[in-house]
Image: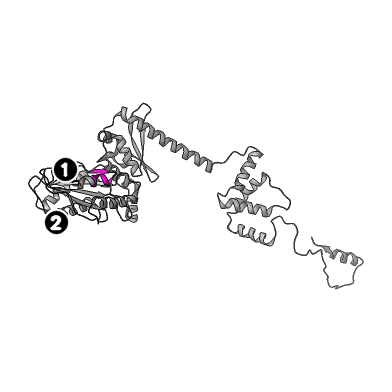
């Protein structure tokens, strides 16, 4: 049994469904759906169901997956055998029971075969089928099933050959392995490795490679010199950028350029445009960071007033607001705002880091007091009188001693 030379992916389910179910004079019987996991059987019904699954992931440009399995001329299987074989094949390929698929049988002089049409989008959560090295995997799985179902063996790469074709990739660190185990999903590094390998099985030029990467949310950044010399890609996913050397030798430019049939005259304009776009995004990000975190030089009162006004009207962080509130508490009645308030605000921002100070300031405010309040609610003791028992006759200066006892207290 043989599969298609290359598994196909597409944008529209309508085209492949109409093709698979279209009657032809070369068919011994009209094509018909013999299995799968879909409710409908006619072309309109199947298209509607497939489109509904694709709508779960509108970011995926090619949700269609299509392959065919063909017996040698003169051989045939019953409908039940075909369905069992196809179900086993799809499960081994990595499709779940909630990936929609249908099997359409064709019977003609070239040999009995079925078309398998599937959605890459899982109905549960919209998880995407990636398919790592799926063309090699398909050949290996077909050979295994030929033995299991006692079918005629067909030529193809041996399982040992497929194993030797495994790409050279950087292993995950211990922390990355623990993260994958803990979260139950691949790290950005693993996702990039798997996705790039899968794309390379179908992409055969730079533009197709770049388009497929963008389809999966990966931003390729080419390292191309002004002279036009291309040195490779770095790949950014989920806000993290990886050089090809961080992913493995299989992702180096020496390996990619042959698979992608790189032609400088044709591909360099696209690569230069990608590089310019990446640089523009980087400069914009740096500019936003400077505007957000930078502080203007404090060279003049005018500059101080501008910055103080910006802080007063800004609601960026809560401490600035609390500091301004505290400043209002401490300011004496009748005082006006000035550039010096800016310095006071900065000082009070630091003071507010002391845990109890903000609470103390709030208590003062509720009591209607300020830190610089001069009037006290306590009565002033003006003098203290003291009396001593007379153990002897008072001398001539007793009056002076009494007067000295009355001392004003301040």
- Residue 337 seen by the camera: yes
> What element does badge 2 sit on?
helix
Instruction: Please tell me whether residue 122 is drawn above or below residue 154 in the rendered image.
Output: below
- Residue 275: x %, y % from top left: 39, 34
Numbered label attached to residue 161 = 1
Instruction: Please tell me whether residue 96 is drawn above or below residue 261 in the rendered image.
Output: below
Quadrant of image for the C terminus: bottom right
Instruction: Please tell me whether residue 95 is drawn above or below residue 166 in the rendered image.
Output: below
Nearest the viewer among 340 and 272 is 272
Name, please, the residue furthest toward the top.
227
Q: To which quarter of the image does residue 232 belong?
A: top left
Image position of 274 (left or right of 333): left
Any magenta on residue 263? no
Image position of 387 (left or right of 110): right
Numbered label attached to residue 80 = 2
Q: State yes or no: discs 1 and 2 in contact (Cβ < 8 Å).
A: no
Q: Which numbered disc flags the more N-terminal residue, 1 or 2?
A: 2
Nearest the viewer among 346 and 390 is 346
- Residue 191: x %, y % from top left: 32, 47
Q: Disc 1 versus disc 2: distance between alpha carbons?
A: 32 Å
Image position of 106 (left or right of 241): left
Q: What segment carries the magenta color?
A: 8-17
Name, please, the residue furthest toward the left.
74
Local crowd size for mark 2, using a 10 Å CA cut-off: few (<14), some (14–19), many (≥20): few
Q: Which of marks 1 and 2 is in front?
A: 2
Q: Which colour scheme is used?
A: one colour
Question: Which residue is painted at 64% across and 54% down in the image?
Answer: 326
Local crowd size for mark 1, using a 10 Å CA cut-off: few (<14), some (14–19), many (≥20): few
């Amino acid at each position: 049994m043989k599969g298609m030379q290359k598994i196909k992916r597409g944008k529209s389910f309508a085209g492949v469904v109409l093709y698979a179910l279209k009657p032809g004079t070369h068919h011994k019987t009209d094509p018909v759906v013999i299995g799968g996991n879909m409710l409908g059987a006619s072309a309109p019904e199947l298209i509607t169901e497939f489109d509904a699954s694709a709508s779960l992931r509108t970011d995926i440009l090619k949700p269609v997956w299509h392959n065919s399995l063909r017996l040698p001329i003169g051989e045939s299987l019953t409908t039940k055998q075909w369905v069992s074989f196809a179900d086993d094949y799809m499960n081994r390929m990595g499709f779940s029971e909630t990936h929609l698929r249908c099997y359409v049988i064709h019977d003609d002089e070239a040999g009995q075969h079925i078309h398998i049409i599937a959605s890459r989008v899982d109905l549960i959560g919209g998880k995407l089928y990636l398919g790592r090295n799926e063309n090699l995997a398909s050949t290996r799985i077909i050979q295994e099933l030929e033995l299991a179902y006692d079918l005629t063996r067909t030529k193809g790469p041996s399982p040992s050959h497929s194993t030797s074709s495994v790409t050279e990739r950087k292993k995950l660190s211990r922390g990355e392995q623990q993260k994958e185990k803990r979260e139950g999903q691949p790290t950005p590094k693993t996702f990039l490795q798997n996705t790039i390998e899968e794309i390379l099985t179908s992409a055969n030029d730079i533009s197709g490679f770049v388009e497929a990467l963008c389809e999966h949310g990966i931003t390729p950044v080419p390292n191309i010199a002004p002279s036009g010399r291309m040195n490779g890609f770095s790949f950014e996913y989920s806000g993290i950028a990886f050089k090809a050397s961080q992913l493995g030798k299989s992702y180096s430019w020496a390996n990619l350029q042959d698979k992608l049939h790189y032609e400088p005259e044709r591909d360099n304009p696209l690569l230069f445009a990608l590089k310019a776009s990446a640089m523009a995004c980087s400069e914009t990000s740096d500019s936003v960071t400077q505007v957000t975190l930078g502080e203007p030089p404090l060279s003049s009162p005018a500059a101080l007033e501008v910055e103080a006004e910006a802080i007063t009207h800004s609601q960026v962080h809560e401490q600035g607001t609390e500091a301004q509130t505290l400043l209002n508490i401490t300011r004496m009645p009748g005082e006006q705002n000035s550039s010096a308030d800016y310095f006071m605000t900065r000082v009070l921002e630091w003071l507010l880091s002391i845990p109890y100070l903000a609470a103390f300031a709030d208590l003062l405010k509720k009591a209607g007091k300020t830190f610089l309040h001069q009037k006290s609610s306590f009565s002033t003791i003006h003098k203290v009188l003291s009396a001593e028992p007379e153990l002897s006759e008072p001398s001539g200066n007793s009056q002076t001693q009494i007067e000295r006892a009355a001392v004003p207290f301040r």
